[in-house]
């Protein structure tokens, strides 16, 4: 059981590091940027970046544009 908890803790820590990297990349473009550009800059897939951005938006740290297009083409920025 403790091995499973350590593995889950490692996964959570890895997610936090990626969240931080996504936020740092987003902070480089104060006016906002496209989801795909973040993924390209960080070497992450659109799907991975989208998952992190949605979680960060739910936490109130990021604003996603209300566009109806595919998420990789939507823009995002840091929340005020």
Image (cartoon, rainbow, N blue to C red):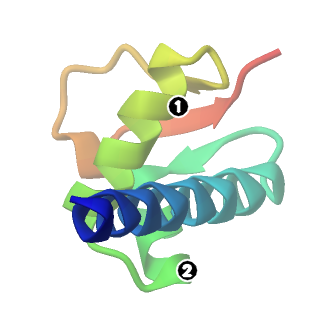
Instruction: Identify the mark nearer the N-term, 2 or 1.
Output: 2
Q: Is residue 62 above or below residue 31?
A: above
55 relative to 5 in the view: left or right: right
Q: Residue at x 54, y 35 (%)?
A: 76
Q: Residue at x 69, y 52 (%)?
A: 26
Quarter occupied by residue 17: bottom right
> Mark 2 to mark 1: distance in Å?
18 Å
48 relative to 54 in the view: left or right: left
Res 24 seen here: yes
Q: Residue at x 42, y 31 (%)?
A: 55
Outermost residue toward the front in this view: 1
Single out the mark in the foreground, 2 or 1. Answer: 1
Q: Is residue 60 above or below residue 1?
A: above
Of residues 19 and 74, the one drawn nearer to the viewer in this rendering: 19
Outermost residue toward the bottom in this view: 43
Q: Residue at x 55, y 80 (%)?
A: 41
Residue of label 2: 41
Residue of label 1: 56
Where residue 39 appears, x then y in whole percent?
A: 42, 70
Res 73 seen here: no
């Amino acid at each position: 059981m403790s091995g499973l908890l350590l593995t889950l803790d490692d996964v959570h820590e890895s997610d936090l590091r990626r969240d931080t990297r996504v936020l740092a990349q987003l902070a480089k473009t104060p006016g906002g940027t496209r989801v795909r550009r973040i993924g390209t800059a960080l070497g992450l897939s659109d799907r991975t970046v989208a998952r992190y951005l949605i979680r960060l938006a739910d936490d109130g740290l990021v604003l996603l544009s209300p566009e109806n297009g595919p998420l990789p083409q939507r823009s995002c920025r840091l929340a005020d």
